[in-house]
Image (cartoon, rainbow, N blue to C red):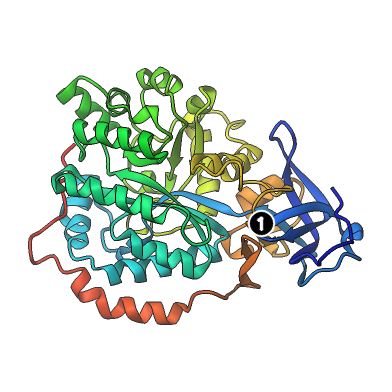
C-alpha cells in the first residue's frame, strides 16, 4: 500500500529497512528497502523507500541496515520481581518459594513495586519488548509506570483464596478501574494466582465475573508435572480439568507455563469455549531442572496459541524475550527429538502474532501492517556475530541478541533511540531500589505470603 502525499504530514516515516511481514496465510516474509508510514500511532502503510521519499513527515528515521520487527511481547512476567533478581539461586521449586521468595514478598511496599516495575520496563524496552502481561500485587503502581514510560501491558492484580473474598474483589476493582488506562495501552485481566492457591469456589466466582464484565483471566496452571501429579492424587483431576469444571476455560484465558499439561488435558483445552493461550518461559524451567517443557507442538495442533515469556527475573534472572525465542526453538527441538521443529520462522511467528493473540491483542499488534498499532523495533545486524546473513529468520532467532535492538517504538512514540532510553531514568531507579533492598530482603520475621505445597 502506498499512501498519498496529499493531506497532513505523517507523524513518522521509517525508511530503507527490511521489514518482517506476514502474508495472508500468516507466513513470515521480509520486504527489503521498505518504508513504514505511521500516523496517529497506527501503521498507515508499508511501502518502498522510493515511494515514501517525497511524503511529508514530522519525523524520519533512516533505518538503513536495520530490520524492522513487530515489538516483542512478554506474555507472562512479574515485572516488580527484578528487585529480587539473584536472591534465590540453585534451589528446588518448593524451597525457592517457601524459604526465600514468598518471605521476601511479604515485605513489599507500593514503592518497591513501582521501582521494580520501572527498572523492568527499562530492561524490556532496551530488549525490544513493547508489551508485557503482568500478574502481581499493587498493580496500580505498575499501571502508573506503564503510563509514564510509554509501554503497552495486560495487567492483573493477583490474589490467593487465603486472602478471603477481599482478594478477589481487589482483582476485579483493579481490572475495571484500569481497563483502557494510559490512552488505551493498558488492558486488564482477573488474576487468580493458580489452582493450587485459589479454591474451586473462588475460581468459579472469577469465571462468572469475567463473563459479566467482559474480562479475560490470567493465571498459573499446570506449571510443572509435580503439580499435575499432586492434583491427580489429591483431587482426581488435573489442574487443567479444575479450570474446566470451574468455568475458567469458558472465558478468554492466558495460562502461564503449562509444562505439566498431559495428554488427557489436550481435548479439554481443545473444547474450551473461550480463547485459550499458553505462555512459555523455558529459561526458568531449565533453571529449576523441571523434566518437561511446554508442549508447544501438541498445543499448536489443537489451535492453542503459545506466546513467549520470561516469567519474573527472580526465577529467570532476565526479562529478555529475545533469549526466550531462541530457547523455545532449541528446547522444542530437544523435547521433540526433531531438528525440523521448531524452525526459526515458526519461532518468529510465536514471538509476533501468536504472542499478540495470547495477550488478547491479536487484532491490533503483532504484525507491521496497515491498521495495526505502530509497535516497532529496529534491529541492527551489522555486528560480527550476525554476519554473513544466509537465512534472515535464523539470524534473527539464533544469532541476534537483545543488545542489537537500536530503537523501540510504541504507538508511534520512540521510547529508545539508538540505545538511549528516553522515558526512564535508570540510575535514579537503581538508587531508589538500593535504599530499599535491606528491608525488602529481610526474612528474619518468619512470614511468607503463601505456602507452596504441591
Residue 399, percent from left and from top: 63, 53
Is label 1 in a helix, a strand or a loop? loop
Q: Quadrant of residue 386?
A: bottom right
Q: Is residue 37 above or below residue 276?
A: below
Tell me which residue sits at (26%, 31%) in the image.
204
Quarter of the view holding residue 408: bottom right
Q: Position of residue 246 (x, y in %)?
A: 27, 27
Q: Quadrant of residue 198?
A: top left
Label 1 neighbour load within 10 Å: few <14, some 14-19, many 20+ = many
On-image quarter of the C terminus? top left
Query: For the image shown, how many numbered marks are present on the structure?
Result: 1
Q: Is residue 259 left or right of residue 96?
A: right
Q: Residue at x 35, y 18 (%)?
A: 264
User: Residue 337: in sight, yes or no?
Assistant: yes
Confirm whether residue 92 shows in the render: no
Percent from the top left, x then y, of residue 251? 40, 32
Percent position of residue 311, x then y: 39, 51
Relative placement, left or right, of 5 versus 318 is: right
**Residue indicated by mark 1:** 374
Residue found 87% across the figure and 64% down from its top: 55
- Which of 33 and 7 lies nearest the eye of the viewer? 7
* For residue 421, above or below residue 79: below
Amino acid at each position: 500500500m502506498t499512501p498519498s502525499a496529499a493531506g497532513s504530514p505523517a507523524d513518522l516515516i521509517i525508511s530503507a529497512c527490511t521489514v518482517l511481514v506476514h502474508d495472508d496465510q500468516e507466513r513470515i516474509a521480509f520486504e527489503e528497502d521498505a518504508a513504514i508510514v505511521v500516523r496517529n500511532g497506527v501503521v498507515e502503510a508499508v511501502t518502498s523507500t522510493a515511494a515514501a521519499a517525497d511524503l511529508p513527515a514530522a519525523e524520519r528515521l533512516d533505518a538503513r541496515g536495520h530490520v524492522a520487527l513487530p515489538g516483542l511481547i512478554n506474555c507472562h512476567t512479574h515485572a516488580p520481581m527484578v528487585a529480587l533478581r539473584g536472591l534465590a539461586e540453585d534451589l528446588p521449586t518448593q524451597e525457592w518459594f517457601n524459604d526465600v521468595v514468598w518471605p521476601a514478598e511479604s515485605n513489599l511496599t507500593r514503592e518497591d513495586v513501582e521501582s521494580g516495575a520501572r527498572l523492568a520496563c527499562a530492561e524490556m524496552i532496551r530488549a525490544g519488548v513493547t508489551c508485557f502481561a503482568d500478574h502481581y500485587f499493587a498493580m496500580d503502581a505498575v499501571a502508573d509506570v506503564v503510563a509514564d514510560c510509554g509501554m503497552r501491558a495486560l495487567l492483573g492484580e493477583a490474589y490467593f483464596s487465603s486472602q478471603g473474598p477481599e482478594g478477589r474483589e481487589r482483582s476485579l476493582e483493579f481490572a475495571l478501574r484500569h481497563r483502557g488506562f494510559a490512552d488505551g495501552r493498558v488492558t486488564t485481566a482477573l488474576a487468580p494466582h493458580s489452582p493450587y492457591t485459589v479454591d474451586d469456589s473462588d475460581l468459579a466466582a472469577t469465571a462468572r465475573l469475567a463473563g459479566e464484565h467482559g474480562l479475560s483471566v490470567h493465571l498459573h496452571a499446570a506449571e510443572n508435572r509435580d503439580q499435575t501429579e499432586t492434583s491427580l492424587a489429591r483431587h482426581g483431576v488435573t489442574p487443567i480439568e479444575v479450570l474446566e469444571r470451574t468455568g475458567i476455560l469458558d472465558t478468554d484465558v492466558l495460562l502461564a507455563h503449562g509444562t505439566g499439561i498431559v495428554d488427557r488435558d489436550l481435548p479439554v483445552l481443545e473444547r474450551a469455549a473461550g480463547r485459550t493461550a499458553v505462555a512459555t518461559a523455558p529459561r526458568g524451567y531449565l533453571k529449576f531442572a523441571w523434566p518437561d517443557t511446554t508442549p508447544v507442538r501438541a498445543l499448536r495442533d489443537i489451535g492453542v496459541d503459545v506466546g513467549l515469556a520470561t516469567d519474573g527475573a527472580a526465577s529467570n534472572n532476565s526479562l529478555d524475550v529475545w533469549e526466550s525465542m531462541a530457547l523455545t526453538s532449541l528446547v522444542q527441538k530437544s523435547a521433540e527429538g526433531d531438528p525440523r521443529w521448531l524452525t526459526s520462522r515458526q519461532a518468529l511467528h510465536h514471538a509476533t502474532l501468536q504472542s499478540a493473540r495470547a495477550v488478547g491483542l491479536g487484532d491490533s499488534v503483532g504484525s507491521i501492517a496497515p491498521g495495526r498499532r505502530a509497535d516497532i523495533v529496529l534491529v541492527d545486524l551489522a555486528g560480527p556475530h550476525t554476519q554473513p546473513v544466509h537465512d534472515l529468520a535464523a539470524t534473527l532467532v539464533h544469532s541476534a541478541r537483545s543488545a542489537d535492538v537500536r530503537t523501540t517504538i510504541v504507538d508511534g512514540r520512540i521510547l529508545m533511540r539508538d540505545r538511549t532510553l528516553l522515558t526512564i531514568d535508570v540510575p535514579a531507579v537503581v538508587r531508589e531500589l538500593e535504599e530499599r533492598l535491606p528491608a525488602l530482603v529481610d526474612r528474619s520475621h518468619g512470614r511468607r505470603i503463601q505456602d507452596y505445597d504441591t
